[in-house]
Amino acid sequence: MASVGERLSRARVQAFVGRDGELERFEEALAGGPHAPFAFFVCGPGGIGKSTLLRRMADGARAADRRLVELDGRFVSRDPADFEQAATAFLDVPGTVLLVDSFEHCQWLESWLRHRFLPRAADDTLVVLAGRRPPEPEWTADPAWSRLLHVTELEPFTEEQARALLTSARIRPELRDRVLRFAGGNPLALSLAAAAGSKGCGREEIWTPSADVLRTLLAGLIGEVPTAAHRRALEVAAQAHSTSEELLASVLPDEDAHLLFSWLRDLPFMESTHRGLHPHDAARETLAADLRWRAPNAFEAVRRRLADEYLRLLREAPEERVWTVTDDLFHLFRESRILARLRTWSREDEVHDRPLHPDDLGAVLTMAEETEGPASAELVRHWARRQPQAFSVYRLVSTGRMVAFTARLVLPAPPDAEDLAADPVVAAAWRYAEATAPVNPGEHIGISRFSVYPERYQVPSRVIDLSSSRAQAEAARARGRAYGFAVYRDAETWAERVRGTLADTGERPRVGDHTYGLFGVDWRRTPVETWLGHFISATTDEPLSPGPSPLPRTAFDQAVREALTHWGDASAFAACALLRSRLVADATEPVPHLRDLLRRAVDELAGDPRGVRAREALTAGYFSRVPTQEAAARRLGLPYGTYRRHVRQGLDLLCDALWQRELYGRR
């Protein structure tokens, strides 16, 4: 009796249409033909049939008793070493066939494959790469590779081939012309049409010609889903990078995950991978767009549940799985307008990171000196000695050339005096922490201290993408992390880029010839869940609450003093800078609101034993309409020096209290 695999293979052969020339050339290579190519590159747009052709090639390789290695570019690590480990048999076992589908998702490996990996292949091996983009011209420009590589750009089906597919799918003859006019020769559209017809969805009105082919096809395929639970499962699959049965069970805990997963797997646009189910890209986009339009609240609710589950996995995952889960998490936020200011999402000039090796230090110091100057290079040397594990070096995947380095420091409380004395930026971070919400014993701060990519210095790049992802993963997994800080030289530009994600501390430390901006988040007051929640809505661009003030801390403190000074002058008070703060952002009448807020904040100082005299001094000096500060001191019966000491203490306490309210709202 035939195995399930053999039966599936026979079914694919019976249903397969077209691509005869491509299969014949591949079979010639399997047979060891003297002029057959070693490498095949199949390219073409989404839905043209690349994956279907690869499955037929895989069946042919098995029938020829070849060792088969199948990889999916959507789940290939950015580190070439991981690709090499997954495809070890291709290098060690003669006759192995390597198939890489969705190659456009890992096409940064192309140069590395051509120069470093494929030349080491074992005897009689074959490789097939299938992706949306054509190969780099360097393949055909090289006379040696041009003889070993066969490139196929798949075309739509001819009318004869399309009719053959519909006939094999038992589409009623009277509907075939309509389906052909609707779907043309696109294999995906024809396959979905065939699946809809075979499921009883072949009503004539479905195939009315329309510009929105996939939307109509999917509507015909899915129709009314069996239950609300099935609809929710489809919504999960539309947003998750890949959907496993375990993920479904976690996101939909009250439903039968096994039943729902089986239903999803049987949908004709759903692909099974080693990580779970993955909708065809075009189908995913259509499903997600339909859900966002039809039920935006449900769309965001599913995204929130997925984000919560990914965070749980991230905190519990073993070290080797951390970056896979991190990639899944940030996949949810690819359309966020906030992240669009910070991340490139591009995989061109792809890099991978490795821990700093002692042999790398010379190159790292050279990069630091060339971009930030000798003073910064000395600080790099200091931290490489103190925390070598904080450093990562980045190499281009294509060539292996080192192009960048980063350092994400971890500094416990209390800080080391030597570190504070050595590094003005770290000293500024601690100064800000002490002035806002001090770091307690047992807590620590994380600071992305260096990000040096000379060719793309301090602009969004893959290096900043990866380093930011690393920093967020560390923040989610760390215990006792009080603050996270990032450092950028072009402070004004980055203040706009990080708006809504990090607060501008107002600190501008100087190292050598350059001044740096310090931006941060208090993870105790803004948990990672809250921070990520601001990215849930793909369209929002409002600042995070809690979040940064439009005024730096020094300007904010000055604005508080200015408002008190102008308390008795209505026109001057109405123009004071504090009215630009978040304190009154939601007030319908900002001026009366600010007056009331200041009076209450001063009164609340009396709740602290240190603030009783301070509250009296501020009230007498600013709210009692006395002509001079000396008169206010006399009213309180205090020497002028003592009165001024109480005023200074009161202003410090008041500014601290209002700054906390500015950042975090009323507590």
Image: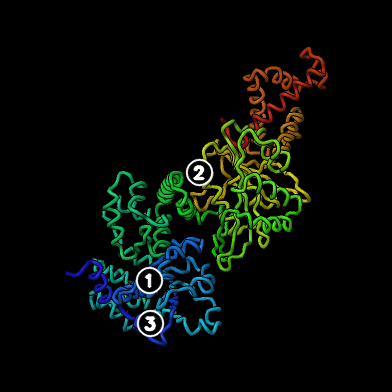
x and y, in percent, of residue 479 in the image: 51, 38
Specify few, some or many for label 2: CA neighbours under 10 Å numbering under 14, 14-19, or 20 or more. Answer: some
Question: Which amino acid lies under the numbered mark 1 shown in the image of this protein?
Answer: Ser
Residue at x-position 40% and y-position 71%: 98
Looking at the rendered structure, which numbered label has been put on residue 51? 1
x and y, in percent, of residue 473 in the image: 51, 47
Question: Which amino acid lies under the numbered mark 3 shown in the image of this protein?
Answer: Ala
> Which quarter shows the C terminus?
top right
Quadrant of residue 73 within the rendered picture: bottom left
Going by the picture, which residue comes out furthest to the top? 637
Q: Nearer the viewer, residue 199 or 15?
A: 15
Q: How many marks?
A: 3
Query: Is residue 587 shown to the viewer in this render?
Result: no
Q: Secondary structure at mark 3?
A: helix
> CA separation, marks 1 and 2?
37 Å
Quadrant of residue 265 within the rendered picture: bottom left
Q: Is residue 564 left or right of residue 70?
A: right
Looking at the rendered structure, which numbered label has been put on residue 476? 2
Q: Nearer the viewer, residue 113 or 166?
A: 113
x and y, in percent, of residue 342 in the image: 59, 54
> CA separation, marks 2 and 3?
50 Å
Specify few, some or many for label 3: CA neighbours under 10 Å numbering under 14, 14-19, or 20 or more. Answer: many
x and y, in percent, of residue 17 in the image: 31, 79
Q: Which residue position holds label 3?
A: 29
Residue at x-position 55% and y-position 62%: 346
First reached walking from the N terminus: tag 1 or tag 2: 1
1 vs 3, front mark: 3
Specify few, some or many for label 1: CA neighbours under 10 Å numbering under 14, 14-19, or 20 or more. Answer: some
Q: Secondary structure at mark 1?
A: helix
Q: Secondary structure at mark 2?
A: helix
